[in-house]
């Protein structure tokens, strides 16, 4: 090998995983816009039931490529953990979708992106109930995050102007944080991609009966929302999850977490570009404060050396 090519190869090996993580974050951020578009044509349970069913199909080739067949004990742990994770995913994803659908104001996808991003701050706070310690910086981040949330949610009328959609998104962010902690508990003892497929299946199975019980499911509605549905199922589930796996193999966890926190920014940019919608200046300020809080919560502790 030519000596001159070795540094370039090493540099490419470091850059490519970062690109994969950025792509995953961009897809997940853009998904807030497609969720909003899908909400014009179908209910939350219908959308998530079909989206996660497509997600299972899109993960099948990923499983064949990246994972070996586990032994019986590991397979059993994967299924049981997937059932638990799927139950949490069912609650979190539908709270998020309800929050997006109920907010009819311009810039609602951007708003949902910033509020949902609170899960990054909530994760270490929920960890306190599991006996984990929270660094002082996390508490500062939490104060900033809630201050940003107030700027987004509270209008000129005061607390009475807080929308039910924002409340649902905040509760959803708590469940997303719980989902992160649940995955962290089992990630080292299960097959990760098979785990994702199982929880997608559980979420889809829980959503579909709920859709027929509480929503009006029509073929026309599904047809009209097919493009955002395909994006949410194939790209947000299968493609982005694959990018996450490929990226996190070569990116430090703290760096990956910061890149994933860019979802909110990608949501705001994609909503402006695709729909021409923007939030008010006060809400953008609130989003910026939340984002600063998110970054602070992910700052690695200072080492003595």
Image: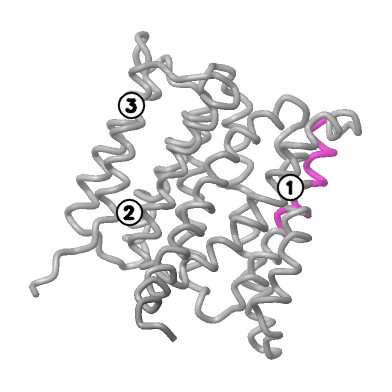
Q: Position of residue 108 (x, y in %)?
A: 53, 25
Which numbered circle lies on residue 150?
Answer: 3
**Tag 1 residue:** 51
Q: Residue furthest top?
A: 157
Looking at the rendering, the stretch of residues picked out in magenta corresponds to: 201-216
Looking at the image, which is closer to me, 296 or 94?
Answer: 296
What is the total number of numbered labels drawn onto the structure image? Answer: 3
User: Which residue is pictured at 52% across the width and 45% down the height?
Assistant: 26
Q: CA distance from mark 1 to mark 3?
A: 32 Å
Query: Predominant secondary structure in magenta?
Result: helix
Q: Quadrant of the C terminus?
A: bottom left
Give the quadrant of residue 217: top right
Residue 212 belongs to magenta span? yes
- Between label 2 and label 1, give the one nearer the viewer: 1
**Tag 2 residue:** 125
Q: Earlier in the sequence, mark 2 or mark 3?
A: 2
Q: Position of residue 238 (x, y in %)?
A: 67, 58
Q: Are marks 2 and 1 in contact (CB under 8 Å)?
A: no
Q: Position of residue 257 (x, y in %)?
A: 39, 57
Q: Is residue 167 visible?
A: no
State the SS at label 2.
helix
The crowd level at tag 2 (other Cα within 10 Å; few <14, some 14-19, many 20+) is many
Give the quadrant of residue 100: top right
């Amino acid at each position: 090998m030519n000596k001159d090519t070795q540094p370039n190869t090493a540099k490419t090996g470091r850059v490519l995983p970062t690109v994969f993580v950025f792509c995953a974050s961009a897809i997940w951020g853009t998904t807030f816009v497609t969720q909003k578009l899908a909400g014009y044509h179908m209910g939350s349970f219908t959308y998530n039931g079909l989206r996660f069913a497509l997600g299972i199909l899109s993960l099948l080739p990923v499983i064949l490529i990246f994972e070996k067949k586990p032994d019986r004990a590991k397979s059993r742990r994967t299924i049981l953990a997937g059932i638990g994770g799927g139950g949490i995913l069912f609650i979190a994803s539908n709270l998020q979708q309800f929050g997006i659908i109920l907010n009819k104001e311009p810039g609602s996808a951007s708003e949902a992106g910033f509020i949902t991003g609170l899960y990054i701050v909530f994760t270490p706070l929920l960890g306190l109930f599991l006996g984990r310690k929270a660094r002082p910086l996390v508490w500062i981040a939490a104060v900033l995050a809630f201050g940003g949330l107030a700027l987004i949610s509270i209008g000129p009328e005061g607390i009475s102007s807080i929308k039910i959609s924002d409340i649902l998104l905040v509760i959803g962010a708590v469940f997303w944080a719980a989902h992160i902690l649940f995955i962290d508990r089992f990630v080292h003892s299960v097959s990760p991609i098979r785990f994702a497929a199982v929880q997608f299946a559980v979420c889809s199975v829980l959503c579909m009966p709920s859709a027929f019980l509480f929503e009006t499911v029509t073929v026309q509605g599904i047809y009209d929302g097919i493009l955002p549905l395909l994006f949410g199922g194939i790209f947000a589930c299968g493609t982005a999850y694959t990018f996450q796996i490929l990226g996190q193999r070569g990116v430090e966890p703290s760096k990956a977490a910061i890149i994933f926190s860019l979802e909110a920014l990608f949501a705001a940019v994609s909503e402006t570009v695709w729909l021409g919608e923007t939030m008010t200046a006060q809400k953008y300020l609130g989003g910026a404060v939340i984002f600063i809080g998110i970054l602070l919560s992910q700052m690695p502790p200072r080492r003595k050396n």
